Image (cartoon, rainbow, N blue to C red):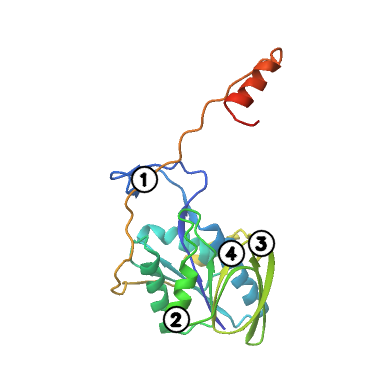
Amino acid sequence: MKILVCISKTPDTTAKIAFTDNNTKFAADGVQWIINPYDEWYALVRAIELKEKDPATVIHLVTVGAADSEPIIRKALALGGDEAIRINADSHDSFYIASQIADVAKQDGYDLIFTGKETIDYNGSSIGGMVAELLDLPYVSLAIKFDLEGNEATIIREIEGGEETNKVALPLVVSCQKGMAEQRIPNMKGIMGARTKPLKVVEPIAVDALTTIASFDLPPAKAGVKLVSPEHPEELVRLLHEEAKVF
């Protein structure tokens, strides 16, 4: 079985967010970059678990990004990917990214494509569905459990108010979230081995982006804290009534 895991580079959750170029670009200076957690903890680790049950399984990683995304690809290889493909493009348009991934997937004929449910920077949750549509494959989103028996997958996904169980024949595309697997840390053997694993760079196909970023805005600053003396509870009542509008 061949599995393709989609990997994205995102800022660490502790990164200070700022923008440049008239608020149209993320300020990347000094930012610590990580593998998108939904891609790493759930999609990639579940693929690794499947390979542990069937050693004949091959795991390929794919990312759309510039050369500065290679360190996070190497970390994904250290976790357990067999080889990686970097599509040499820098775009935040979901259709453009999905089209590049779909083109790679068409060439190698994967049985299973895993994505994270979304990236933690843009929260678009759109890549998996677009890849499935471009490949004309079944798509199951928000998966919290994935089991495979022969050529049939049993997938449990979250829905409004509960869970839904799906049975789907391979090949298919699945987006993964919490519940699919448990986070792993690369061991020294994996880190050393990742240095020599294949990382192929391919040029992007011609695709017109469908969206552009007009501007980013930071959330409004939080109001300052007001301290009320315990000797004057009536002041607290007044503030809750007149300013906080609690009652």
Q: Determine whether label 1 and label 2 are within 8 Å by CB.
A: no
State the mark number for residue 189: 4
Residue at 37 percent across and 72 percent down: it is 100
Find residue 233 and report its horizontal and vertical position in percent.
70, 17
Q: Mark 1 points at which residue?
A: 27
In this rendering, which labeled residue sits more in front, label 2 or label 4? 2
State the mark number for residue 80: none
The quadrant of the rendering that contains the N terminus is: bottom right
Q: Name the residue under label 3.
A: 182
Residue at 42 percent across and 41 percent down: it is 218
- The vertical placement of 40 against 24, above or below, is below
Q: Name the residue under label 2.
A: 135
User: Element at badge 4?
Assistant: helix
Q: Which three-letter amino acid code belongs to the residue tagged 2?
A: Leu
Q: Which of marks 4 and 1 is nearer the N terminus?
A: 1
Mark 1 neighbour class, 10 Å CA radius: few under 14, some 14 to 19, many 20 or more: some
